[in-house]
């Protein structure tokens, strides 16, 4: 279980890094390196910015929750091991 939580946390971290790097630093949306013109045509300028921003927030919240859950899981395992000794 701990391994699965660790892998999931690492995956969320990589996705969050990728999403943050895709964003334009001036708040303009998807960077042209990643096909910004096609994304703007497909989603519209306002919708793609909203989607990327929401995805960033969701991934940040997921990372926060996974860190807390993993911490609680490790603490409970340590308590079980202490009681067995």
Image (cartoon, rainbow, N blue to C red):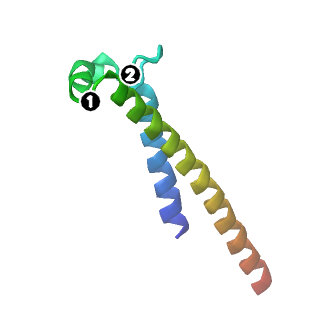
Residue at (43% x, 26% y) in the render: 21
Residue at mark 1 to residue at mark 2: CA–CA distance: 11 Å
Pick the front one: 44 or 36: 44
Q: Position of residue 78 (x, y in %)?
A: 73, 72
- The local crowd at label 2, few if under 14, some if 14 to 19, many if 20 or more residues have their Cα within 10 Å, is many
Residue to which mark 1 is pinned: 43
Q: Is residue 85 visible?
A: no
Q: Give left or right: position of 64 versus 18.
A: right
Name the image quarter holding the C terminus.
Answer: bottom right
Pick the front one: 66 or 37: 37
Pick the front one: 7 or 17: 17
Q: Secondary structure at mark 2?
A: loop
Residue at (42% x, 24% y) in the render: 23
Q: Are marks 1 and 2 in contact (CB under 8 Å)?
A: no
Q: Secondary structure at mark 1?
A: helix
Q: Position of residue 49 (x, y in %)?
A: 39, 27
Residue at (55% x, 66% y) in the render: 2
Work out whether mark 1 precedes mark 2 in sequence or the reverse, and give the earlier one: 2
Q: Position of residue 9 (x, y in %)?
A: 51, 52
Q: Which mark is residue 51?
A: none
Q: Which mark is residue 29?
A: 2
Q: Is residue 24 above or below residue 80?
A: above
Q: Give left or right: position of 76 versus 59.
A: right
- The local crowd at label 1, few if under 14, some if 14 to 19, many if 20 or more residues have their Cα within 10 Å, is few
Q: Is residue 15 visible?
A: yes
Q: Position of residue 58 (x, y in %)?
A: 49, 45
Q: Which is closer to the viewer, label 1 or label 2?
A: 1
Q: Give left or right: position of 70 versus 3.
A: right
Residue at (49% x, 49% y) in the render: 10
């Amino acid at each position: 279980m701990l391994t699965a939580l660790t892998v999931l946390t690492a995956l969320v971290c990589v996705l969050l890094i990728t999403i943050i790097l895709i964003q334009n630093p001036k708040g303009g949306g998807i960077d042209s390196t990643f096909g910004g013109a096609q994304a703007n045509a497909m989603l519209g300028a306002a919708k793609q910015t909203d989607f990327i921003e929401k995805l960033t927030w969701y991934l940040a919240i997921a990372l926060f929750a996974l860190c807390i859950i993993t911490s609680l899981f490790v603490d409970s395992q340590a308590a079980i091991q202490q009681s067995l000794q």
